[in-house]
Image (tube, rainbow, N blue to C red):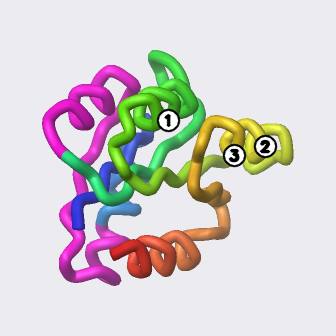
Amino acid sequence: MNILIVDDSKILRNSLKLFITSKIDEARVHEAQDVKHALKCIENALFDVIILDILLPDGTGFEVLEIIRNRNLGSKVIILSNYATAKFRQKAAEKGADHFFDKSSDYEDLVHLIRNSR
């Protein structure tokens, strides 16, 4: 299972990568720190699951989400953000996100969802 984590925090990416790989043996986790790197990763590989932060140094996760959906990549897209407001949840749904999780509390739910995405 190929997973891409797109978040500007290296600490969060590493922590999430360790958490996911400790729970899902077959997970191959890739990382991107911004929109540019995320798009490069998406051009070079297919991902079963893409985890996107909303606010990135050179744009937003919503921009990446829109590109993913326009290209019909078939990836499950999960927004993972500290900004778990109704406004952002609605925008994520409108742009085609499959799920939206709060960084501060939803890691177990995230792993459960990834595990069941096979």
In the rendered image, the vertical position of residue 67 relative to residue 19, given as above or below? above
Which residue is at a point 37% across and 52% down the rendered structure image? Answer: 75
Residue 65, numbered label: 1
Q: Is residue 68 magenta?
A: no
Q: Which residue is mark 3?
A: 93
Element at badge 1? helix
Q: Which residue is mark 2?
A: 90
Residue placed farthest to the top in the image?
A: 58
Q: Is residue 44 magenta?
A: yes
- Amino acid carrying label 1: it is Leu
Asked whether disc 2 touches disc 3, contact meaning CB atoms under 8 Å apart, the reply is yes
Which residue is at a point 52% across and 70% down the rendered structure image? Answer: 110
Is the C terminus in the top left, top right, bottom left or bottom right quadrant? bottom left
Q: CA distance from mark 2 to mark 3?
A: 5 Å
- Write the start and end of the magenta stretch as one range: 18-45
Element at badge 2? helix
